[in-house]
Each structure stands twice: as C-alpha cells, then as structure tokens.
Image (tube, grey):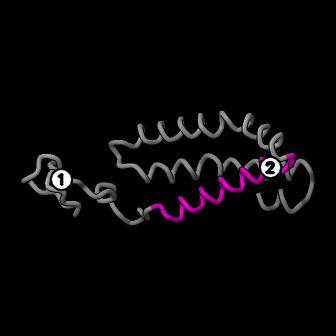
Amino acid sequence: MTALLLRGEPGGLVLGYSLIGLALGTLVPSAFLAELFPTRLRYSGLSLTFGLGSALFGGTAPALAAFLVRRTGDALAPAWYATVLTVVAVACVLLAPETAGRPPWKRRRAITRTGDRSGSRSAASPLTAA
C-alpha cells in the first residue's frame, strides 16, 4: 500500500487510500467491537451497534450536512462535524477496556444476585453457575 501511495500516480493513490479505508473502516472496527461484548451476546451486540450507528449517523448524514452548510454558510461545516465525531470516537476507543491476554470468560465481570462483581464463579449463585 505504501508503494502505491509514494509513487504519486492518481490510480495508485486511489487504490492505496481505498485499501487503507477498507482496513480501517471495516476490518479494525469489527474486531474491536467484537471484543467489547461477551461471547454469548456478541452477534446481537454487533448487529445492534452497527444497525443503530448506521441509521443514526449514516442515514442522517446527507440531511445534516445540507442543514449545516445552509445554517452556517460554511462549506466546510460537514468536515467539522466529521472531525468532532472522530474526536468522540477516539475518546471512546481510549476509554474502552483492554481485553488482550485475558480468556473470553474472564473479560466481563459477572454480576451475581448478591451484587458481587468479582467475576469469580460460585456454586451458591444460580446466575454464575456454568
């Protein structure tokens, strides 16, 4: 990819940036979001997150961009909107829990009926029994 970008040819630039966009726009978020949900809720969590995000931000983006340009008179208003959303997304990523090196069953703390959040499984609580 770097060789395509460094050549400076228009076709190589388009292809190189497209490949980077593919990797950063689809592959990385999928793996990142999958790690945020426990295994038994992963598909539901990912589909709900993707569906709501697409509907709220992707579906309203053209109308919001037109509104921002009309309201502010600045043709760069949609770019500022995207910049603000990017800053919020980066903050969310930085605040997300690190899950590397932990087995999937220890990534989420279990909540028992007694309110114990230790994550340990005990036979006394039916909510944490395997």
Choose top left, top right, bottom left or bottom right for residue 114: bottom left
Given the image, on which type of amino acid does mark 2 rest?
Answer: Ala
For image coordinates 71% across by 51% down, the residue present is: 82
Task: Judge left or right: residue 106 versus residue 34.
Answer: left
For image coordinates 32% across by 42% down, the residue present is: 40
Res 44 label: none
Reading the image, the residue beneath label 2 is 77
> Callout 1: few (<14), some (14-19), or many (20+) C-alpha neighbours within 10 Å?
some
Choose top left, top right, bottom left or bottom right for residue 3: bottom right
> Callout 2: few (<14), some (14-19), or many (20+) C-alpha neighbours within 10 Å?
some
Q: How many discs appear?
A: 2
Considering only order in the chain, which callout, 1 or 2, is on the residue closer to the N terminus?
2
Disc 2 or disc 1, which is closer to the eye? 2
Q: Position of residue 45 (x, y in %)?
A: 43, 41
In the rendered image of this protein, does residue 51 appear above or below residue 121? Answer: above
Q: Is residue 75 magenta?
A: yes
Reading the image, the residue beneath label 1 is 112
Range of magenta residues: 73-96
Q: Is residue 64 magenta?
A: no
